[in-house]
């Protein structure tokens, strides 16, 4: 599973990046507005939401919980927002996708019995640490999907998947590629190959 994290870029607008990722076959886009104003987020959403609907692409957002709810986005990834997953489930409803960023095994284990759909490793974490956390987490019988979000080269995604993660979330490796569409296609191909081995 590939998520494309769409954020501001000095070459392309966010809607352009989303368009290219979808053209490359990505079926899940995560908007990361960072410090954008609500009005800028709304402007981007006016272009991105119809595009995702037309292509049946999942669209979620990093934090900005109230804005995501207002815009009718599929769900959120909690990074800095301190609201609990239970609060978000009540706010968004049972069909929403709720993810939580984690940085340790303790944080992963704290999600036992919590109504979230996946956990995403902090982008600063190295693959060796992630692999150990995944192994220990799975040894406890936990099946929650765990997602890698780092800067691994697309050609190394097989090694990333070998760590035991359920999928990857990429941003710069696609956005800064010479051809983002081809980079997305390559990432999907690498993930498919890894799943077959």
Image: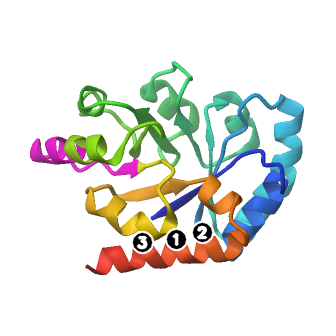
Q: Residue at x 33, y 51 (%)?
A: 145
* Circle 2 or circle 3, nearest the eye: 3
**On screen, residue 83 above or below 97:** above
Q: Residue at x 82, y 39 (%)?
A: 41
The residues tagged by marks 3 and 1 sit, at their Cα atoms, a distance apart of: 6 Å
Q: Residue at x 67, y 30 (%)?
A: 64
**On screen, residue 18 above or below 87:** below
Q: Does the segment drawn in magenta span residue 61? A: no
Residue numbers of the magenta segment: 134-147
Question: Helix, strand, or loop for circle 2?
Answer: loop
Query: Which residue matches tag 1?
Result: 187
Whether residues under marks 3 and 1 lie with C-beta atoms below 8 angstroms apart, the answer is yes
In this view of the protein, can residue 97 be seen by the observer?
A: yes
* Image quarter (top left, top right, bottom left or bottom right) of the N terminus: bottom left
Query: Which residue matches tag 3?
Result: 191
Residue 28, horizontal then vertical, whole percent: 58, 60
* Circle 2 or circle 1, nearest the eye: 1
């Amino acid at each position: 599973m590939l998520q494309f994290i769409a954020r501001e870029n000095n070459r392309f607008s966010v809607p352009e990046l989303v368009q290219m990722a979808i053209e490359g076959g990505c079926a899940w886009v995560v908007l990361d507005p960072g410090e954008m104003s609500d009005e800028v987020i709304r402007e981007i959403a006016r272009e991105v939401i119809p595009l995702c609907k037309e292509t049946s692409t999942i669209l979620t957002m990093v934090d900005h919980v109230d804005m995501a709810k207002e815009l009718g986005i599929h769900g959120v990834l909690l990074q800095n927002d301190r609201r609990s997953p239970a609060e978000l489930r009540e706010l968004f409803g049972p069909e929403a996708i709720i993810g939580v960023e984690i940085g340790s095994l303790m944080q992963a284990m704290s999600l036992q019995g919590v109504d979230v759909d996946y956990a995403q490793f902090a982008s600063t974490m190295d693959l060796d640490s992630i692999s150990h956390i995944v192994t220990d987490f799975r040894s406890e019988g936990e099946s929650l999907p765990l997602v890698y979000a780092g800067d691994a080269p697309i050609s190394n995604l097989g090694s990333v998947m070998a760590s035991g993660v359920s999928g990857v979330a990429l941003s710069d490796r696609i956005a800064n590629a010479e051809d983002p569409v081809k980079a997305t296609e390559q990432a999907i191909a690498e993930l498919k190959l890894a799943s077959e081995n």
